[in-house]
């Protein structure tokens, strides 16, 4: 692999190679990618849709795209002008960057010298423009019939009250606030309140376990943690406050004492009296926040001041705190939202993602509100009380843009069209997909059945690190190919490189990198600049390395083929194999663990764990269950292994490196493709593992 690969291997830590999954040519979910010259492949937007679209032809896109590449400063300045800046950026510092580790430290800066506030732009600006009476959010609870809404004026009042409370609690500019909430309106309210006063929010997905939450709290040392007492998902009540209590005890043992836990009473899930309470630290949201004034001055912050931290998985056990700043992220999340969904002020927009992930940051909260859109916040589970719930919600609110993940599409596809047919879905206009490659079969079902072959699908490729869409259809501008994310967004220069980091032209397949920065790019990994540079910029000097494989066809369409590092994508959630391994080996009976991803019909990928037990411990179903429990409590239920494969020994090289390539083949039962096993210290373990496959 050349110097780049060596650097990357070093970055990934001992015994790991970032591209050990290396399968940039792989098909998605076992489905072969369509033949490149298949004429039936193109799916055109209707003439009517295209005629009304913001970008209505490939020609128009090409001109705008070319301009964005030839004159990024001019292009992005014009976009930035659409927002309110308390102080304009320095015209000669629209963008300053160095993406080449050989030329010094990595640096990305946008709109330097500018002062603004994203909360002001997302909320106040809409009220001041006369749209205070427009609904900003509809909230749909877990139970059908349970709902609420907030206009932009009401949202502003609530954000201000919470912002004032936070200030009174001693939270100031640059302080961290951890938010551990389910999909209540209070979640985006909390994000916006932090942004308003210049505090840095770190939302932790409320499906993470106490240990995972504690780890994040210890890393970013928040002044306040915001949570609620409980949430109901489907028929299950999840006592979030108990989880937070455990996490905060754990953090305190690690030297991080959080002084205040602001707890929203989610009465429909659990009442006050049944909620565990620590007097002195815990405060009921409803007891304090409503008494604060509904006006709160905006803290004007520098374009490059941090906006939020969001932890994501990488190749090693420790989650990475991806840091986004204010100005560039604001401009980028807003403009990508507008174009990729061809947003119109009359749209009703629903993104099913949770605000605990980047999709919920950029495309539930910031992107839509910056455009003055009406968004739906859904607390429940998409198949509760039955698999028709999504379409019930679509009809109830007249949803026009529906943005979701392939895993949900596949799971609803499995439940059959009967539930879909009960609802009209006539309001739908644009569909969207995110989180993992969408296999052509799921794409067709989404398009034909959900969208009645009427709604273009925006298959948006992007990452926590990129802040916003990178490769995405503009729905009215060009025909789509089911399964392809199509072309780059304005200002984005994707390149496909080979092992040695050489850019490939035309039809090709390799590692997806980005040349030049874009406004939404993350600026660092919190507290770990070294890891930032080593993970993303050292593997291929001069480029941002995405960790994904990609193929480009002869028409220039991009086909994402999945991660090429040790990250598994389960239902659109990124999970590091090392994280799961670290969790497993915490089990007292587990000696060693090796985790690989396997194709999974609904989740996209499933987690397959090989474990060796400590000497003399026999494998049993109880052990299996408790191993799975360990992962649930270390990370969260969503990371629970789908399969535990007991391994008396693991295939290792003579230098002790686990050969994951072989484990992947055994896990997917591709036994005739094991390849060369002669370099193993003990080739016999392979046969032994195969023999134990069905245990
Ligand atoms: C937004 C988000 C990022 C990883 C990324 C890639 C996969 C996301 C995709 C996609 C193919 C798409 N991914 N969208 N792969 N097509 N439309 O999901 O962020 O959680 O950071 O995950 O997800 O593998 O590298 P994040």
Image (cartoon, rainbow, N blue to C red):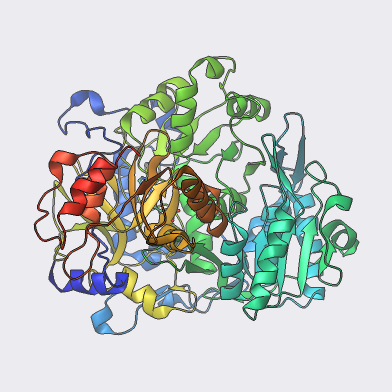
The one nearer the camera, 283 or 327, is 283
Q: Quadrant of the N terminus?
A: bottom left
Q: Quadrant of the C terminus?
A: top left
Task: Report the residue that reaches farthest toward the bottom.
Answer: 104
Left or right of 604 on screen, residue 277: right
Residue at point 54% right, 59% down?
634
The one nearer the camera, 415 or 620, is 620
Residue at point 48% right, 72% down?
111
Reply above or below: 447 against 292.
Answer: above
Q: Quadrant of residue 566?
A: bottom left
Left or right of 389 on screen, residue 37: left
Residue at point 77% right, 71% down?
260
Indicate the position of residue 376 as horizontal and vertical percent values: 64, 40
Q: Quadrant of residue 578?
A: bottom left
The one nearer the camera, 565 or 16, is 16
Task: Report the residue that reaches farthest toward the front.
Answer: 616
Q: Residue 469, can we see it?
A: yes
Indicate the position of residue 407 as horizontal and vertical percent values: 45, 37
Q: Residue 451, can we see it?
A: no
Indicate the position of residue 438 as horizontal and vertical percent values: 36, 37
Q: How many marks are shown on the rendered structure?
A: 0
């Amino acid at each position: 692999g050349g110097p780049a690969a060596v650097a990357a291997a070093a970055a990934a830590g001992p015994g790991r190679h970032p591209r050990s999954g290396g399968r940039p040519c792989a098909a998605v979910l076992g489905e072969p990618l369509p033949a490149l010259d298949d004429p039936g492949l193109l799916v055109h937007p209707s003439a009517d849709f295209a005629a009304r679209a913001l970008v209505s032809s490939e020609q128009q896109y090409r001109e705008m795209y070319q301009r964005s590449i030839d004159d990024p400063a001019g292009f992005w300045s014009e976009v930035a002008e659409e927002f309110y800046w308390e102080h304009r950026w320095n015209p000669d510092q629209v963008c300053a960057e160095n993406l080449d580790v050989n030329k010094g430290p990595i640096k990305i800066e946008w709109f330097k010298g500018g002062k603004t506030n994203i909360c002001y732009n997302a909320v106040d600006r809409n009220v001041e423009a006369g749209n205070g009476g427009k609904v900003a959010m509809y909230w749909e609870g877990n139970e059908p019939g349970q709902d609420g809404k907030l206009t932009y004026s009401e949202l502003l009042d609530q954000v201000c009250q919470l912002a004032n409370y936070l200030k009174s609690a001693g939270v100031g500019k640059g302080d961290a606030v951890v938010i551990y909430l389910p999909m209540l309106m209070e979640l985006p309210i909390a994000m916006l309140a932090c942004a308003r006063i210049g505090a840095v929010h770190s939302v932790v997905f409320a499906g993470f376990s106490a240990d995972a939450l504690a780890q994040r709290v210890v890393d970013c040392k928040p002044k306040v943690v915001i949570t609620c007492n409980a949430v109901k998902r489907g028929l299950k009540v999840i006592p979030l406050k108990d989880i937070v209590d455990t996490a905060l005890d754990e953090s305190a043992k690690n030297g991080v004492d959080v002084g205040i836990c602001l707890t929203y009473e989610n009465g429909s899930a659990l009442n006050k009296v049944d909620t565990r309470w620590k007097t002195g630290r815990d405060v009921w949201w409803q007891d304090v926040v409503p008494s604060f004034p509904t006006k709160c001055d905006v803290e004007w912050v520098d374009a490059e001041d941090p906006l939020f931290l969001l932890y994501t998985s990488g190749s090693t056990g420790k989650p990475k705190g991806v840091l986004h700043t204010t100005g560039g992220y604001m401009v980028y999340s807003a403009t990508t939202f507008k174009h990729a969904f061809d947003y119109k002020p009359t749209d009703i927009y629903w993104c099913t993602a949770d605000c605990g992930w980047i999709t919920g940051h950029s495309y539930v909260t910031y992107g839509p509100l910056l455009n003055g859109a009406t968004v739906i916040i859904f607390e429940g589970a998409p198949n509760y009380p039955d698999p028709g719930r999504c379409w019930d919600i679509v009809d109830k609110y007249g949803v026009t843009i529906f943005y979701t993940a392939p895993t949900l599409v596949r799971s609803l596809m499995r439940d059959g069209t009967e539930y879909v047919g009960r609802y009209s879905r006539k309001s739908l206009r644009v569909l969207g997909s995110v989180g993992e490659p969408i296999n052509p079969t799921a794409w067709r079902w989404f398009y034909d059945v959900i969208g009645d072959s009427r709604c273009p699908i925006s298959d948006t490729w992007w990452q926590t690190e990129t802040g916003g869409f990178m490769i995405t259809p503009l729905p009215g501008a060009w025909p789509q190919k089911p399964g392809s994310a199509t072309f780059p967004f304005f200002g984005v220069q994707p390149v496909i490189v080979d092992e040695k980091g050489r850019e490939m032209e035309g039809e090709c397949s390799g590692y997806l990198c980005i040349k030049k920065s874009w406004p939404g790019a993350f600026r660092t990994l919190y507290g770990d600049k070294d890891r930032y540079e080593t993970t993303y910029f050292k593997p291929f000097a001069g480029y941002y390395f995405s960790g994904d494989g990609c193929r480009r066809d002869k028409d220039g369409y991009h086909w994402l083929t999945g991660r090429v590092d040790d990250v598994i994508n389960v239902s659109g959630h990124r999970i590091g194999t090392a994280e799961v391994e670290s969790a497993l080996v915490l089990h007292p009976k587990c000696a060693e663990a090796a985790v690989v991803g396997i194709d999974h019909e609904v989740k996209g990928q499933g987690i397959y764990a090989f474990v060796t037990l400590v000497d003399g411990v026999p494998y049993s179903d109880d052990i299996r269950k408790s191993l799975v429990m360990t992962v649930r409590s270390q990370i969260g239920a969503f990371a629970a292994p789908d399969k535990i494969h007991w391994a008396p020994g693991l295939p290792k090289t003579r230098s002790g490196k686990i050969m994951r390539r072989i484990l992947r083949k055994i896990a997917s039962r591709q036994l005739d493709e094991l390849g060369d096993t002669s370099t193993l210290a003990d080739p016999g373990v392979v046969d032994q593992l195969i023999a134990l496959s069905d245990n």
